């Protein structure tokens, strides 16, 4: 993972934190799996767009030309951020949920009754329900169940479910409760060998590690931009062949080769696109803090790799500390592997033997720390693991801008409460 070894001095961490205006609050934010904080440069870019070129796209006057370019550039930049260049392109939308639903609707056009779609029990409902609901059109949903013991979805089980009828396999790269990183390349290889397309939910992975959509071979890869330092939008990479096979769900007169508009009903947030572009500025700032030069002042894929790998190294000590504490606690059950290393991300869920998850989150909030309780839309996963869905889990999720001191403060509070 980490090709850059972080010379992480406190001043680097403080410089990074200074980019996030929300961090001037006294609240400690450990709800990053719900949504990350936004760097100032991103918020400023959105405001700047709105007060200078908030106009319609596609016309021939100056501001419209600039606005059109901003939206096109954002698509290209996010494709690079996802590691999709050379293999496919990016669609933007309101959210990952909206994009998965859109995609399933598009696949319905080329499916026949009796075709099957495999969905994963560990998945967030965003990439489950859109496929399961195709049942009303004669498509058969097949559940790739989790092994409750290991809390993993086993590749052998997937192999048994695949058949000539399987058209799509939809699965998460990281469950937003379990936190473990699934081998996307391996699942993709197995699913594609059976002739299926894969739809990978990278939402819980993307804030923490480098996305490599093309390298992994994914046909479709989706993430939520607002969880990766951006505005409330979603982004979906599609491999060229997969894009071409679909007509899209836009109006009848939008041609099949009109990309991305065939998939972007009503367009996307233009100011959001300006914000997405500014994430590059933030990553550039990160690189400068560790003495890495940015050729031509614009961050490229190599720069993205270095920056994301560096940010990942900042998270490891945080997750190690909290995971160790929770794993050792006699009254706590960690939901997900007890790993503390790179095999997981800094999203850690647990339940207590007697305290309600909501009571834990409330008690922690009263101490000025934001964590979250609930099923987090991984409802089927909670059911499979015997977790009361009305309570779900307590989940603390960290990002690179959190500090060891903040984690220690959470541990101190949890020690008292638990
Ligand atoms: C793993 C995972 N997938 C999908 C989603 C849905 O993302 P969005 O809010 O962009 O629809 C979430 C949201 O929390 C998530 O955690």
Image (cartoon, rainbow, N blue to C red):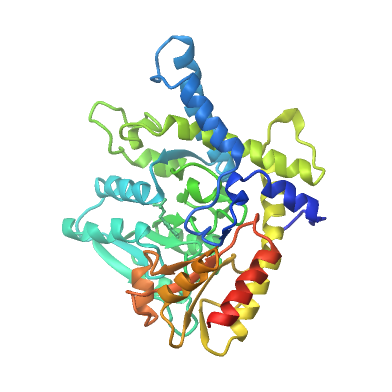
Residue sitting at x 65%, y 64%: 406
User: Quick one: quadrant of the N terminus?
Assistant: bottom right
Residue 140 rendering spot, x and y as whole percentages: 24, 64
Tell me: 271 left or right of 400. Answer: left
Image height check: is 142 above or below 248? below
Residue sitting at x 62%, y 49%: 24
Asked if residue 328 can be seen in this view, the reply is yes
Tell me: 369 left or right of 252. Answer: right
Image height check: is 184 above or below 217? below
Total numbered circles:
0
Residue sitting at x 60%, y 44%: 21
Q: Residue 206 versus residue 183: which sits nearer the camera?
A: 206
Asked if residue 1 can be seen in this view, the reply is no
Tell me: 380 left or right of 393. Answer: left
Residue 331 rendering spot, x and y as whole percentages: 52, 88
Residue 17 rendering spot, x and y as whole percentages: 67, 49
Residue 332 rendering spot, x and y as whole percentages: 52, 84
Q: Residue 249 versus residue 382: which sits nearer the camera?
A: 382
Farthest residue to the bottom: give it.
330
């Amino acid at each position: 993972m980490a090709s850059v070894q972080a010379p992480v001095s406190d001043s680097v961490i403080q410089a990074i934190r200074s980019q996030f205006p929300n961090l001037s609050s006294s609240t400690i934010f450990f709800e990053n799996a719900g949504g990350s904080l936004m760097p100032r440069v991103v918020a400023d870019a959105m405001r700047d767009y709105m007060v200078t070129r908030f106009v319609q796209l596609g016309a021939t006057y100056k501001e419209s030309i600039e606005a059109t370019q901003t939206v096109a550039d954002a698509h290209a930049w996010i494709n690079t951020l996802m590691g999709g260049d050379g293999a496919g392109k990016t669609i933007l939308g309101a959210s990952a949920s909206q994009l998965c639903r859109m995609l399933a609707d598009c696949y319905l056009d080329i499916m026949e009754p009796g075709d099957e779609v495999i969905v994963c029990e560990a998945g967030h409902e965003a990439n489950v329900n859109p496929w399961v609901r195709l049942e009303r059109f004669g498509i058969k949903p097949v559940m790739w169940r989790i092994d409750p013991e290991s809390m993993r979805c086993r590749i052998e089980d997937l192999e048994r479910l695949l058949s000539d009828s399987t058209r799509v396999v939809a699965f998460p790269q990281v469950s937003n409760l379990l936190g473990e990183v699934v081998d996307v390349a391996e699942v993709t290889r197995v699913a594609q060998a059976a002739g299926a397309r894969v739809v990978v939910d990278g939402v819980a992975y993307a804030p923490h590690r480098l996305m490599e959509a093309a390298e992994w071979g994914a046909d479709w890869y989706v993430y939520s931009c607002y969880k990766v330092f951006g505005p409330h939008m979603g982004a979906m990479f599609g491999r060229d062949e997969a894009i071409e096979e679909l007509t899209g769900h836009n109006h009848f007169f939008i041609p099949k080769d009109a990309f991305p508009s065939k998939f972007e009903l009503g367009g996307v947030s233009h100011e959001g696109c300006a914000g997405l572009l500014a994430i590059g500025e933030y990553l550039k700032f990160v690189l400068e803090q560790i003495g890495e030069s940015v050729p031509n002042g614009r961050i490229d894929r190599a720069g993205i790799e270095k920056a994301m790998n560096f940010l990942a190294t900042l998270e490891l000590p945080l997750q190690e500390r909290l995971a160790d504490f929770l794993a050792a606690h006699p009254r706590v059950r960690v939901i997900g592997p007890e790993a503390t290393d790179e095999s997981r991300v800094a999203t850690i869920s647990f339940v207590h033997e007697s305290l309600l998850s909501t009571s834990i989150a409330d008690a922690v909030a009263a101490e000025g720390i934001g964590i979250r309780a609930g099923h987090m839309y991984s409802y089927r996963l909670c059911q499979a693991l015997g977790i009361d869905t009305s309570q779900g889990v307590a989940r603390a999720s960290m990002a690179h801008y959190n500090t060891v001191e903040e984690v220690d403060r959470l541990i101190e509070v949890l020690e008292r409460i638990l």
